[in-house]
Image: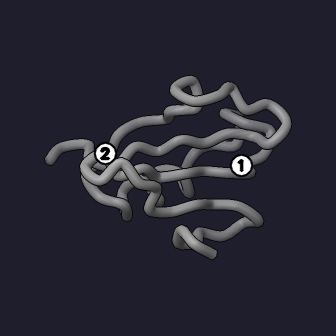
Amino acid sequence: MKNRFLLFAGENYYPLGGAEDLICGYDTIEQAMDAYDKMPLEEYEEKEWANILDIKTLKPVKFFSNEKWREPGW
């Protein structure tokens, strides 16, 4: 399935909310994580959070906060 994983990201202070925080879709979790890690900072003042959603299962599969990636259910 193409673009199975959706990357949402933003700043804690200025989240846009829901679909407006969507960055792009990716074929793998690793591609989504890599895209976030390589995002230029001028897009945001700080890269504070990110979520990766699996559109096949409709469940989040990765979260980014406090400068690291983690699995759901921490």
The amino acid type found where label 1 is placed reads Lys
Q: In this view, does 12 lie to the left or right of 49?
A: right
Query: In this figure, what is the number of numbered marks?
Result: 2
Please report whichever mark, 2 or 1, sits nearer to the chain's N-terminal start: 1
Q: Residue 47: x, y in percent?
A: 71, 49
- What secondary structure is found at the residue carrying circle 2? loop
Establish if 58 lies above or below 42.
Answer: below
* The furthest residue to the right: 13
> Could you classify mark 2 by the number of other residues whose Cα lies within 10 Å: few (under 14), some (14-19), or many (20 or more)?
some
Instruction: Name the disc covering residue 15, or none.
Output: none
| Residue 34 appears in the rendering | no
Residue at image location 66% in from the left, 33% down from the top: 43
The answer for how far apart the CA atoms under marks 2 and 1 are is: 23 Å
Q: Which of 70 and 57 is in front in this view?
A: 57
Q: Is residue 1 left or right of residue 24?
A: left
| Residue 21 appears in the rendering | yes
Establish if 24 lies above or below 53.
Answer: above
Q: Mark 1 points at which residue?
A: 47
Which circle, 2 or 1, is nearer the viewer?
Answer: 2
Q: Is residue 27 left or right of residue 70?
A: left
> Could you classify mark 1 by the number of other residues whose Cα lies within 10 Å: few (under 14), some (14-19), or many (20 or more)?
many
Residue at image location 42% in from the left, 50% down from the top: 53
Instruction: Name the disc covering residue 55, or none.
Output: 2
CB under 8 Å between discs 2 and 1: no
Q: Residue 13: x, y in percent?
A: 85, 36
Q: Is residue 13 left or right of residue 5?
A: right
